[in-house]
Image: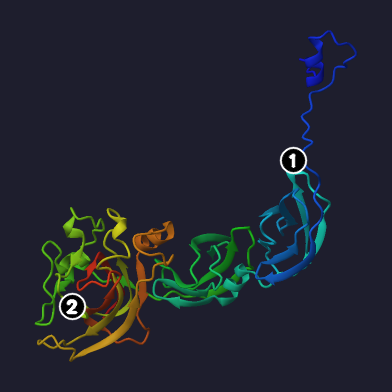
Amino acid sequence: MKKYNWLCLLFSALAWSGCKEEPLRIVTESGKIPELVTNIRVENIPGGAVIAYDLPAGQDLMYVEAEYELNSGQVQRVHASAFSNMLRIEGFGDTSEYKVNLYSVGKGLKRSEPVTVTVHPKLPPVLEVYQSLVVREDFGGIAMEFLNIHQAEVTVNVEIKDSIGDWTLADIFYTSQAQGKLAVRGMEPIATSFGISVKDRWGNQSERMELELTPLYEERIPLEGFRVFNTPTDPVYHQGGPLHNLWNDRFSGGSSSRDTWTRTANGTGMPHHLTFDMGVQAKLSRFVLHQRGVLAETNLLYSGGTPTHFEVWGSNAPASDGSYDGWIKLMDCEIIKPSGRPVPENTGEDIETAQAGHEYSFPLDAEPVRYIRLRVLRTFGNTDYSWWGNLAIYGQIQ
């Protein structure tokens, strides 16, 4: 079907002659092409740059646009309104020199000629994280520590070389934490080739760190041997939240599922401790703690009686009077909320971290113990009681 421009349609009713058939075109004539930005200043930052400039005079400017190409070939466009005199560009995967085109965009989306500026990004976060990685053999796998001072969204990818020399993905960790510890578990104590790399949300990826490591043997301490070990200094427990719920492998946490959490009574006071017997002596490797509410009531996470700071003590001959005679402190622990947001604001990463469990590694030189005491120093809600979800303990039974 042929289309006519609007003038032809208008005058055809008046028997106007001489109009030619042509494709319909929509043309916006409002506004002028704005002048260029001037006095451009560049501050190079990790993986990008902050570009400042003077805005052109006049009322025609709608925004300033930066256009640049990443290492992947993807073209990025960043806008800054006419009320701002700077914009931030990011996504570069190295410290090479890059060209950025700046456009003044006016009404009717009319764009000026480009002003080209050169940027030299500093070391990008993806490489900073990679260079900070410390990897070591650990019980049941490997342990990794990292720094991410710019809290960039990155993934840490762990690969394993198979019997024919091909790399296969063993695990992938997503994080934006400023620092953290990661672990690959469930592996046999045999020499294994690991490959570790870091990738960011723009597709930039570090090189692969290759290591041959041998995981240390570990097993989960059997639940059947766990027993409550009451002493005169241990607290009274809230009705429906006895201590033995701490190791029953039930995770719901809801108020209607009282066998899934442990809670000391109101007025217990701080600090206080929870004491139990594992039934066997073991050289401990790690434990995994799940908060109350990981499934049924995620609003309880990082709140109320959830411990934020606590200590783990061990003994083979605990004093019957409930004192700390015969006990040794094994480690200090903290439950860290990844987002740092106030209660009850939990991000997806906060919830996923809690559902995966908070893992703590015992010192490699710690002596084997049979009895465990959890000494609570503070809770997220600054309460005078504490509540807990579930605990799993791993190590080498002696």
Question: Could you classify mark 2 by the number of other residues whose Cα lies within 10 Å: few (under 14), some (14-19), or many (20 or more)?
Answer: some
Tell me the amino acid under the disc marked 1.
Gly
Q: Quadrant of the C terminus?
A: bottom left
What is the quadrant of residue 329 in the picture?
A: bottom left
Q: Which mark is residue 340?
A: none
The image position of residue 155, as x and y in percent, is 54, 63
Q: Is 321 positioned to the left or the right of 307 in the image? A: left
| Closer to the camera in the image, 228 or 149 | 149
Circle 1: element type: helix
Q: Quadrant of the N terminus?
A: top right
Q: Can the viewer see residue 390 in this picture?
A: yes
Say above or below: 304 vs 396: above
Question: Could you classify mark 1 by the number of other residues whose Cα lies within 10 Å: few (under 14), some (14-19), or many (20 or more)?
Answer: some
Tell me the amino acid under the disc marked 2.
Gly
Residue receiving disc 2: 269
Circle 2: element type: loop
Q: Residue furthest right?
A: 18
Q: Which residue is drawn at the image coordinates 78% and 66% (left, top)?
A: 40
